[in-house]
Image: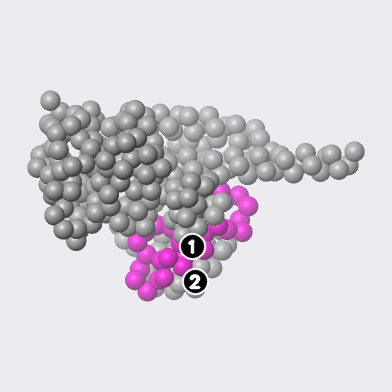
Amino acid sequence: MAGIVLDGKAYAKELEAELTVRVQRLLQSVLKEPPILATILVGDDPASATYVRMKGNACRRVGMESLSIALPGHTSTEQLLGAIEELNANPRVRGILLQHPVPKQIDERACFDRIALEKDVDGVTSHGFGRMAMDEPAYGSATPAGIMRLLRRYEIPLEGREAVVVGRSPILGRPMAMMLLAANATVTICHSRTRHLPEVVRRAEIVVGAVGKAQFIRGEWIRDGAVVVDAGYHPGGVGDIELAGAMDRCSAYTPVPGGVGPMTIATLIAHTVEAAEKAAEAVAGKHGMDAAARL
């Protein structure tokens, strides 16, 4: 019998309905304006352009605004840093997304880290990662944070269970491992060079594919009853895990497409709304203090 489908597409629609209500409340708050998510796209990669367009559409569905910054492929690090600084200084922008990857001549890490922490809704800064890893308030990387939302939605138990994350990128594999650890799972981080990888994966009760290689994790590696989360997406509609060889034996799995992808975008929008709510609280608090000072 096939496992439970962890339907990210359906849950993302539920989240959008909730976020629409929260955006309407922001319009009635001291801000009196919808939050803006700013996206920066450097170059003309078609897949990246599609992702940016999807994020803009999601903003509009919940009543937010999107601001798209398109820069040519020959943009320098200094020019990109300048664009980020302008968005940091824009009081209406509540979230900033720098679409990954950027052209090779750009220092991507320096540009990620220039994003203001309070606007780092995609969870890409070193500061944000450090705070998240230390269980301090921060917006976690959107894809792993979306996965955690989805696991909670389907009441997948994590505490005490053995989880294996295959992938170690700073915006997916590593933060995914930290989030699972914070949920009291026992976590092993693997990668394409891990020795005896099939044996490591076979002992996992929760498997997260985040290695960025199509069907790199074979279906026969998955133990019976495991929870399978596939964070990859490749041409042909396949992920990092050979799902066809595992879905009849696992207890739950994310489909590709329709699993992790929609949750990434929904979580990015949720983080932006939360950032706007925090800004509204800060402005309301300041107005209250100013009124008290005049008494």
Q: CA distance from mark 1 to mark 2?
A: 15 Å
Q: Is residue 6 left or right of residue 96?
A: left
Q: Position of residue 126 (x, y in %)?
A: 46, 59
Give whichever of 21, 164 is nearer the camera: 164
Residue 178 locus on image (x, y percent)? 38, 48
Please state which amino acid type lies under the numbered disc 1: Asp
Q: Nearer the viewer, residue 16 or 270?
A: 270
Tell me the residue that label 1 is attached to: 113
Left or right of residue 281, residue 107 in this image: left
Residue 33 placement (x, y as % from top left): 62, 41
Q: Is residue 258 above or below residue 93?
A: above
Q: Tell me what residue is drawn at x 49 percent, y 43 percent.
A: 271
Magenta part of the protein: which range?
88-116
Report the quarter where the N terminus lies. top left
Q: Quadrant of the C terminus?
A: top right
Q: Secondary structure at mark 1?
A: helix
Q: Nearer the viewer, mark 1 or mark 2?
A: 1
Q: Pick out the residue farthest to the top.
A: 1
- Residue 121 falls within the magenta-colored stretch: no
Q: Position of residue 68 (x, y in %)?
A: 47, 54
Q: Which mark is residue 25?
A: none
Residue assigned mark 2 = 79
Residue sticking out furthest to the right: 295
Q: Is residue 252 above or below residue 57?
A: above
Residue 47 appears in view? no
